Image (cartoon, rainbow, N blue to C red):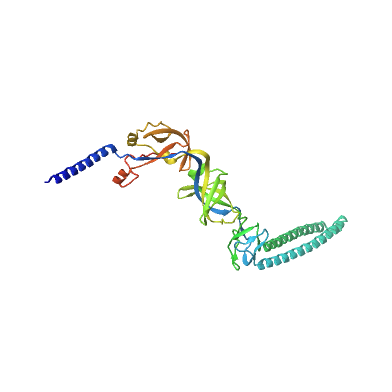
Amino acid sequence: MTSRTMRRAIVAGSLIGGIVVTAVVLSARRGPDVPALVDEPLTRGSIVRAISATGTLEAVTTVQVGTQVSGTIASLSADFNSIVRKGQVLARLDPALYQSAIEQARANLDRARADADRLRVTLADARVKLNRAQELSARQLIPATDLEAAEVNVRSAEAQLKSATAQVSQAQAALSQGEVNLSKTVITSPIDGIVIARNVDVGQTVAASLQAPTLFVLAARLEEMQVKANIDESDLGAIREGQHVTFRVDAYPRDTFEGTVEQVRLNPVVEQNVVTYAAIISAPNRELKLKPGLTANVTIEVARRDGVLRAPTSALRFRPTDDLRKAFGAGAAPAGVTVLWQHVDGRLQPLAVTAGISDGAYTEVSGVPEGARVVTRMVANQAQGAATGSSSTSPLMPTGPRPR
């Protein structure tokens, strides 16, 4: 081996040895992999606690217009979406049968009146005969039986006249009933409103036997509507009249409508062992976008805090494990209180706070300064992520219960 070759071998060996020594030193200094902590500052803002539900839009006042008499629909004067006024004719039934009944009732009334007049004449004649019999009996010119017969005839005529008078009244009532039935063949609107349903056509026969069939459904005003929302029994205690409500409908996915809780009806509805209660929510509809029957996705604001100090809810769920406490030298947390954790100078320090309402993302806190940074979660470093194939798993990952 030449001297030049020997020098090259010595230089190469020195370089390799230096690289090995450097790698060993760096490896000793790096130490074990430790997860990274993510913290966020406490901020001020609004917290809104809300309850979600589904409901159906409906008119505030809905009137079903029916018929009290049976018959065939002769004509219709209103259709779907027709604007109608109180007293306006909506439909007419064929009046032929009721006109015939009125003519018959009028004939019966005339006959009853004639019978009554005849019996009045009979009564007058019986009274004249009674007076004559009384005079003759006073002079003892007729036997007592003739006087008694005259008295009986008067009383019989009076009874017959009363019966005839009652028949006149009965015939008059029948005529009046016929006239009322005839008037009922004209169906009129009981309110000012809009026709939202028409259930009959011309030529259709309707029978009003046990109950009045519904011909039309009228909505009083569509400018003022309401949502009938189904509230789960677990949320019922948080619902109050006057609470602010927002809701959306699929027909207008970009629009948010507002309303107010007007009433909570204490009538439970049980479906598949699920108990719900109906909440009535006002829904102003000035632009007439909302239509009866639309499904509304309702959000009821049950609590609100404005301008309060708030912490990410994930910070209240953060709980360091024993391994994490050893890695960061975490102090002992006070018992029986809500605790947030701060990462200061490489150490985890507990911070006792008082928690208020929560909207899921943020929770109201007090007893800490604004701007303080608190730990919300931890992530595995790159070395651990490469070893495990994930950047969010670690044997030091903390777990804890969700805050109330």
| Relative height, residue 290 to residue 330 (above, below) | below
Q: Position of residue 311 (x, y in %)?
A: 46, 39
Q: Position of residue 270 (x, y in %)?
A: 48, 49
Observer-nearest residue: 117 or 246? 246
Asked if residue 14 lies left or right of residue 1, the reply is right
Observer-nearest residue: 282 or 385? 385
Observer-nearest residue: 388 or 356? 388
Task: Tell me which corner region of the image, top left, top right, bottom left or bottom right, holds residue 400.
Answer: top left
Task: Tell me which corner region of the image, top left, top right, bottom left or bottom right, holds residue 382.
Answer: top left
| Relative height, residue 143 to residue 359 (above, below) | below
| Relative height, residue 366 to residue 217 (above, below) | above
Asked if residue 367 lies left or right of residue 395, the reply is right
Q: Position of residue 189 (x, y in %)?
A: 65, 59
In the displayed orientation, state which residue is furthest to the front.
Answer: 3
Asked if residue 123 lies left or right of residue 383, the reply is right
Q: Quadrant of the C terminus?
A: top left
Residue 31 at least partly seen: no
Query: Which residue is depicted at the point 40% across and 35% down?
Result: 341
Query: Which residue is depicted at the point 68% across and 64% down?
Result: 182
All told, the count of numbered labels is 0
Asked if residue 86 lies left or right of residue 385, the reply is right
Residue 181 at least partly seen: yes
Q: Position of residue 58 (x, y in %)?
A: 56, 54
In the displayed orientation, state which residue is furthest to the left.
Answer: 1
Observer-nearest residue: 200 or 47? 47
